[in-house]
Amino acid sequence: CAKSLGRGRYILFDSEMYEQNLKLMQLDSDLRYAIERQEFELHYQPFVALATNKLVGFEALIRWRHPERGLVSPTEFIPVAEDSGLIVAIGDWVMHEACQQLRKWQTLFPETTALKMSINLASHQVRESNLIEKLDRVLAATGIVGSSICLEITESTLMDRSELTIDKLRQLRARNIQLSIDDFGQGYSSLGYLRRFPINTLKIDRAFIDRMAADAENLEIVRTIVVLAKTLSMNVVAEGVENQQQVTMLKQLDCKFAQGYFFSRPLPVLALEQAIATKILEI
Ligand code: C2E
Ligand code: MG
Ligand code: MG
Ligand code: MG
């Protein structure tokens, strides 16, 4: 390995880059088989209404159970899948799996029929010409109505070929599918561009929530996003809420919804069902 060569920094750096590239190539080739080998699973993180602490819905978050490397984080493999285009096939699997799971929960816990399933959508998926047909098929096959699902997209997805995107988002809204902007505040946002898109919810990036208590400027950013959402008649969800102090501050700002470790980590299916059955999570 590089370090045992004991050479200069340049070589060390170079061979670290080489190893990093090799690792990425290996990841990319392993990813190609992961769907058929059924190595993916979804964990579900609740989001709640701050006024009652009750469940409003879940966000589906993908996990990869790699045969040698164990559980691989989506922050590691989603960017690789986006580069190769494999994200479309993975995204199709996520969409179907999350809707099927929601249907099961609606049967198992009838109180859950009002809950939403939130699904992350990559730019590639939004750009696909048959996204709408695919969603229609998934909804029909799983018996889920459009209003039960919410698609999370990022600001950069919105900026990308925006006329086409607006048209597609309108078609989704025509099916009552909800739309959220994920990690809001990280990209370019202006009132002007936001108004053009049929968005229902802003999810405040967790970096702002994280620094809100220690840093007045961050607190002002969070306040501004909450007001902005209200002005545009959108909902607002605070992401990454980890403690009571943040909950108190968010309530003072009149932020209605939150998601984060304080309420629950993302959970595998059985753990989530147990939390609902034992009323650790209230509906
Ligand atoms: P995201 O959509 O913004 O999801 C929220 C991330 O924040 C999740 O990370 C979640 O576990 C983490 N999180 C939630 N609450 C807290 C908290 O209180 N503190 C901290 N420190 N973190 C918290 P995760 O599951 O690792 O996912 C990372 C990202 O990967 C997601 O960010 C999303 O961009 C992407 N991703 C995950 N699943 C999918 C998927 O099915 N499709 C696509 N396209 N992207 C996905
Ligand atoms: Mg998300
Ligand atoms: Mg997010
Ligand atoms: Mg994120």
Image (cartoon, rainbow, N blue to C red):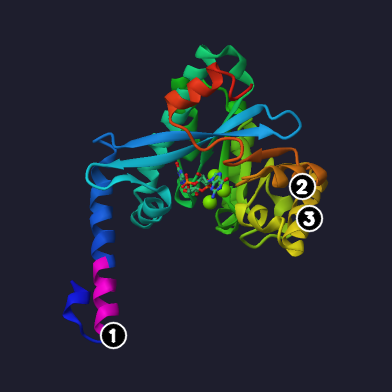
| Label placed on residue 224 | 3
Q: In this view, does 215 lie to the left or right of 94?
A: right
Instruction: Tell me what residue is drawn at x 26 percent, y 48 percent.
Output: 69
Question: Which quadrant, please, contains the N terminus?
Answer: bottom left
Question: Which quadrant, please, contains the C terminus?
Answer: top right
Q: Mark 1 points at which residue?
A: 10
Quadrant of the image occupied by residue 217: bottom right
The first of marks 3 and 2 along the sequence is 3
What distance separates the C-alpha of mark 3 from that of mark 2?
A: 14 Å
Label 3 neighbour load within 10 Å: few <14, some 14-19, many 20+? few
| Label placed on residue 249 | 2
Indicate the amino acid at tag 3.
Answer: Thr
Quadrant of the image occupied by residue 7: bottom left
Q: Where is residue 151 in the image (x, y as percent from the top left)?
A: 56, 39
For the record, the magenta segment spans 11-19
Say above or below: 238 vs 115.
Answer: below
